[in-house]
Amino acid sequence: PGWLFSPAGRPYLDSIFHKTQRKAFGLLERPVLPPTLAAPIVTYKLFVSGKSGVGKTALVAALAGTPVPPAHHETLGIEATTVYWPAKIQASGRPVIFELQFWD
């Protein structure tokens, strides 16, 4: 569980954070790693649905490291947010980067 904070996992964590803030990646951007640390990117599309006003947008904002909206406003249409998260698979021992596409 502490792999991200170990010397082996620190470069992966640094690729998605700038100091203490999560980096915001655009549609065509990805975390940059040295070629020796290249890791496969596994993509998941997560559709968040539910009743109005229950905190779906606030949840996605908190996971993405962006400011949570202070007041409730209805999301018009679909809002897509991409979050990258490195992990080490226990079975293989290899690091991967998860690309989580939240559709709110």
Image (tube, rainbow, N blue to C red):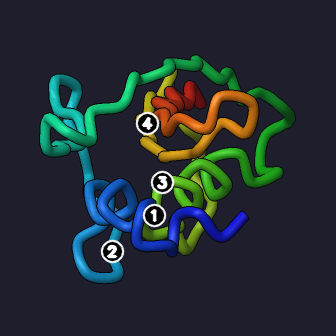
Q: Residue at x 58, y 56 (%)?
A: 63
Mark 3–mark 4 Cα distance, whole angstroms, equals: 7 Å
Mark 1–mark 4 Cα distance, whole angstroms, equals: 11 Å
Q: Which mark is residue 21?
A: 2
- Along the line of sight, which residue is nearer the eye, 24 or 14? 14
Q: Are marks 3 and 4 in contact (CB under 8 Å)?
A: yes
Q: Are marks 3 and 1 in contact (CB under 8 Å)?
A: yes
Whichever of callouts 4 and 2 sits on the residue coming sooner in the sequence is 2
Q: Identify which amino acid the numbered label 4 is placed on.
A: Thr
Q: Are marks 2 and 1 in contact (CB under 8 Å)?
A: yes
* Residue annotated with mark 3: 64
Q: Residues within 10 Å of mark 2 (few under 14, many from 20)?
A: few
Whichever of callouts 1 and 4 sits on the residue coming sooner in the sequence is 1
Residue 31 on image: x %, y %: 24, 42
Q: Is residue 87 above or below residue 9?
A: above
* Secondary structure of residue under mark 3: helix
- Along the line of sight, which residue is nearer the eye, 11 or 46? 11
Q: Identify which amino acid the numbered label 2 is placed on.
A: Gln
Whichever of callouts 2 and 3 sits on the residue coming sooner in the sequence is 2
Q: Identify which amino acid the numbered label 3 is placed on.
A: Ala
* Residue annotated with mark 1: 65
Mark 4–mark 2 Cα distance, whole angstroms, equals: 16 Å
Q: Residues within 10 Å of mark 3 (few under 14, many from 20)?
A: many
